[in-house]
Image (tube, rainbow, N blue to C red):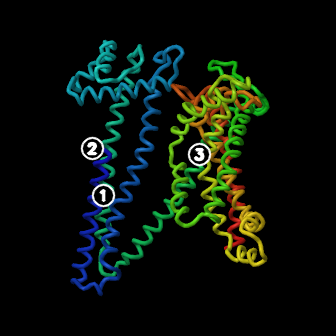
Amino acid sequence: MSIGLLTLIVIALAAAGFLIGRQLALSKAGGDIRRLHSLPGYYGQTVFLFTAVPALLLMLLWLLVQPLLIETRVTSMISATDIPDGSSASLVMTDVRRIAEGIDLILARGKLGETDIAAMRADLADVRSRLAEVGVAVGTNVKPGVFEAAKAYRDLSHSGHLALTVAVLALALAGFGYALSRIRPEFRARNVSEGFVRVLLIAASLVAILTTVGIVLSLVFETIHFFRLYPASKFFLSTTWNPKFGGGSDLGIWPLIWGTLYISVIALVVAVPVGIFAAIFLAEYASKKVRAMTKPLLEVLAGIPTIVYGLFALITVGPVLRDWFAQPLGLGTSSSSVMTAGLVMGIMLIPFVSSLSDDIINAVPQSLRDGSYGLGATQSETVRQVILPAALPGIVGAILLAASRAIGETMIVVLGAGAAAKMSLNPFEAMTTVTVKIVSQLTGDTEFASPETLVSFALGLTLFVFTLGLNILALVIVRKYREQYE
């Protein structure tokens, strides 16, 4: 039984419990609602919650834990002789999973039976050819131990799935029966139902917190592992980034930090003036009709996918900057450059700055404007000397939020700035950022056992701390502003 079908069965059982529970409460009250402690719907809601929630939580936990237990057990079945030279246990486990999936496809298409699969041991070339028939590619040398591990992986997965189905249905039925057994006129169904819902709401609110904690802990633990293999002094003090899988790498972070800050500064130089001027126009000068048309059009920029911006940088902006500026000035011959990525990223950030600044300017009390006009100031003088100073803390917060968005951008940098990690003042040279190198170091079949891969976690933690500081600073500034005028 598939997970989707199992979920539907649990929900259907819970829905039936709602109707039965509601009707049972009415029947035990002799059809007189006044004899019930709570409204009939609360009795049905209690049955629904006791039937669905524990069963679905068990399913979720089971799906999270089962793969870890199965992989741990199957990995212990793989001996050192089953791991090819230059490979690793994690790569062999990838083949194990593919073979297990391929066996299921072979059986599903009726090409072989269970007894045939059990007998497939000696002719491993036949195993590879049959897997290729169903579109599953595995390593060139499928060793007997790997194939046996794949069959064990498949058997354990099927057994675990069957046990999951039985356990979830049993728990759902148990909750169904328990909730129905408690229904009587004096049962405080509303209190139980609302208490249950309150617990669910608290659990939902904790998801974001626990997710953040999990992200931070995963980064911290892997970063500690990285610094055990690679000295922290070289990582934070070296100005050379030259990863070499197999040893001899130089993993200095400063070229990446320089490229990140350089591109972000150019983006902010483009986005901040345009965004603030647009916000001033929309808030102070534009008529209602113009504002109603202009603001949605401006905010369309925020809805364009970053990959589209990257293609725009690669195909249009990069060649124009190269042909019109870089080559005539002798500053470079590549269309991928810091300036390309910075300009396009600045265009992307304009709605972030303008929308937040517009809201902040509109939040300035009208009494300040009226007082300025009463003293004889013109509209432009009021904007410069009253509104902007009053809105400055909020505008600074908007700029810092846009900066944190720029620092975390990846696709525009990949297509617009290239992947060269170096420190240069020439804006028409190709450079890269921290986020791009995180992706490149984790791309492909890599094992988390070498400094060249684990460095991604150190880069991610550094970027996380940097952007977290910017976000906290922005929120503090914005909160201070809001407290002042609310």
- Residue type beneath disc 2: Met
Q: Is residue 397 above or below residue 3?
A: below
Where in the figure is residue 263, as x and y percent of width and height? 68, 38
Q: Which residue is mark 1?
A: 11
Q: Earlier in the sequence, mark 3 or mark 1?
A: 1
Residue 148 at least partly seen:
yes
312 over 38 or under it: above or below: above
Q: Say which of marks 2 and 3 sits in front.
A: 3
Q: Quadrant of the C terminus?
A: bottom right
Q: Quadrant of residue 20?
A: bottom left
Q: Return the residue at label 3.
A: 348
- Secondary structure of residue under mark 3: helix
Q: Quadrant of the N terminus?
A: top left
Q: Which residue is mark 2?
A: 1
Q: Residue 376, located in which quarter of the rendered image?
A: bottom right
Q: Mark 3 or mark 1, which is nearer to you?
A: 3
In the structure shown, which secondary structural element does the residue marked by tag 2 occupy?
A: loop
Residue at coordinates 35% horizontally, 78% vertically from top-left?
187
Density class for disc 2 (Cα within 10 Å; few <14, some 14-19, many ≥20) is few
Say the numbered circle drawn on residue 367: none
Instruction: Locate residue 272, reporting x and y percent.
Output: 68, 50
